[in-house]
Amino acid sequence: MILYDMDKAPNPRRVRMFLAEKGITVAMVSIDLPAGENLAPGYLAINPRGVVPTLVLDDGTVLDESLAICRYFEGLQPEPNLFGRTPLETAQIECWQRRMEFDGMGSIALAFRNSQPAFADRAVPGAGPATPQIPALVERGQMLSRHWLDALEKRLAQSSHVAGDRFTVADITAFVCVDFAKWIGVRAGDAHPALRAWYAAIKARPSASA
C-alpha cells in the first residue's frame, strides 16, 4: 500500500501521528500542494478529488479521508486503542473528535485558504472548480479559531485529555490544529495554561514529530 502525503498539511500529519502511535510503517509519496501537484493529471488519475492524504491499498482500493484511513488501521491493529473500547467511550471520542475537526480545523482552514497566495483561486481544497479567495473570511476564521482555542482551554482545565482521561485520536486532531492555527496568527497564550500544559505533554510523545 502507498500513502500519498504532504509534510506540512494538517490532515496528512494526523494520519502520520496515528500510524506512529500504532507503530505502523507505510510507504509514502509526498505531494506538493502549494505547487499544485495534487491537480496534475498523474495524481488525479489516482485520486480524482485531488486531496491528501490518500491511501491506496494493494488491491487498488482508495481511501482519501484522514479519519477513514485512521479507522482502517485501527481495525487492522486495534491496540493501542485510539477510537474507543465501549459504546459510550467511542461516542465520546467521536463527539470531541468532530468538535476539534469542525470548530478547530474548519475555522483555521477558512482563514488559511483565503489568505495564502499559493491558494489564490483554490480557496476550497481539491480539484473542484476555481474558487476565489474572500478576504473577509480570513478575519472570520481567525475569530472562530480564537473561540475554539478558548473552548479547548476550558475543556482541558477539566480533563487531562480532549476526550477523557487518556490519549485518543481527538488529541491528535486537536494537537495538529493548535499547530495549524499558528499559520493564521492564532496561538495559545497566558490565558490558556491548561492547553499549554496539555500541548507540551503531547509534543513530548514520539508521534508528534512524525
Image (tube, helix red, strand yellow):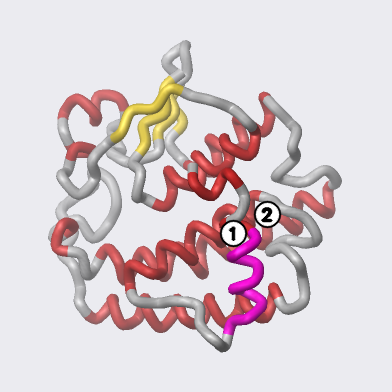
Secondary structure under the numbered disc 1 in the rendered image = helix
Magenta region includes residue 208: no
Residue with the mark numbered 2: 94
Provide the major secondary structure of the magenta segment.
Answer: helix
Residue 119 against residue 210 in the figure, above or below? below
Identify the amino acid type marked 1: Arg
Query: Residue 87 location in percent, x, y?
Result: 83, 48
Rounded to the nearest angstrom, the CA distance separating label 2 from label 1 is 6 Å
Q: What span is colored magenta in the figure? A: 192-201
Q: Quadrant of residue 93?
A: bottom right
Answer few, some or many: residues within 10 Å of disc 1's Cα (few below 14, many 20 plus, some between 14 and 19).
Answer: some
Query: Residue 164 location in percent, x, y?
Result: 78, 62
Query: Residue 188 location in percent, x, y?
Result: 50, 78
Residue 202 against residue 185 in the figure, above or below? above
Residue with the mark numbered 1: 98
Q: Nearer the viewer, residue 110 or 205?
A: 205
Q: Quadrant of residue 113?
A: bottom left
